[in-house]
Amino acid sequence: MNPLELTGQAQTHLVEFAPNRLLHKQVIADFTALQSSAKSAGFTLHVASAFRSFERQLHIWNNKYSGVTAILDQLEKPIDINKVSEREKLYHLLHWSALPSASRHHWGTDIDVYDPSLLPQGQSLQLQKSEYLNGGYFSELTAWLGENIQAFGFCRPYQKDQGGVAEEPWHLSYFPIAENCLVQLDLDLIRDTIQSHEILGKELIQQELAHIYQQYVCNLTPR
């Protein structure tokens, strides 16, 4: 991929998979096969989020950093951003939300999934661990995915909390392409992209970027 594709600023590597859902063109066949297998097992595998542009990730980031949208702690409870330091706020945010230019969703290889038929009536999707683990309404889907995704080329990069990004059982990554994207997404590219955009917390991000890169971009659950 070229630098603009890697950082979510171009869509030349993508095709429309469903309304308002873009995926890398080389992911479509295997994800469709995974959906078919899930259907045979009694699940309706839907895409909650696929490609996310730099601008969309920047909007999410700035809303959280400014307090418009809640930042959650490790227990999925909102924090009071007025009672924590700027550095603490930054790392609380990174636990749940990728830094714009460093999101795996920019590549079109990573997909957040759910089964709408398992949502309780009147309940909207939250993408929280309580839905997917420990008897949550998607827990059977979580177990099935864990046993089957590798056969279709997918993995869970955030299967465990390793002191960086939170555990995300809903997040699937198409390993054959994403692995190469991660190699290409180096620290200098992220730094240059951040420098040229209006992102809240820019000065602190620049100071912490080497650690962010190692702990929140490269620190993944082994495949």
Image (cartoon, helix red, strand yellow):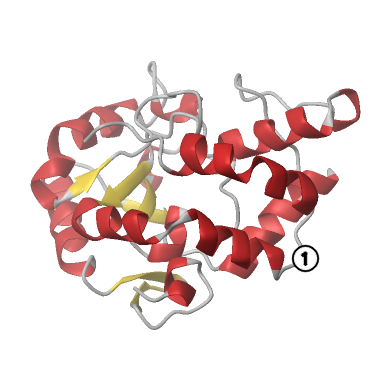
Pinpoint residue 159: horizontal percent, then vertical percent. 34, 30
Pinpoint residue 35: horizontal percent, then vertical percent. 20, 54
Q: Secondary structure at mark 1?
A: loop
Pinpoint residue 121: horizontal percent, then vertical percent. 51, 39
Q: Could you tell whether 170 is left or right of 73 in the image?
A: left
Is 86 above or below relative to 190?
above
Residue under the point 36% across and 32% down: 138
User: The C terminus lies in which quarter of the figure?
Assistant: top left
Please tell me in which quadrant of the rendered image residue 25 appears: bottom left
Residue under the point 67% across and 60% down: 58
Instruction: Please indicate, yes or no, whether residue 120 appears anywhere in the rendered image.
Output: no
Pinpoint residue 101: horizontal percent, then vertical percent. 55, 61
- Extreme residue toward the top, this view: 134
Q: Could you tell whether 176 is left or right of 46 in the image?
A: left
- Extreme residue toward the bottom, this view: 12
Residue under the point 15% across and 67% down: 29
Residue nearest the observer in this picture, 162 or 48: 162
Is 197 above or below relative to 77?
below
Question: Tag 1: Cα neighbours inside 10 Å, few (<14), some, or many (≥20)?
Answer: few
Give amino acid for label 1.
Glu
Q: Could you tell whether 130 is left or right of 97 in the image?
A: left
Is 7 above or below relative to 151?
below
Residue under the point 70% across and 47% down: 205
Residue nearest the observer in this picture, 38 or 51: 51
Give the residue number, with chain letter if any, for mark 1. Answer: 198
User: The N terminus lies in which quarter of the figure?
Assistant: bottom left
How many labels, in total? 1
Instruction: Please indicate, yes or no, whether residue 21 appears anywhere in the rendered image.
Output: yes
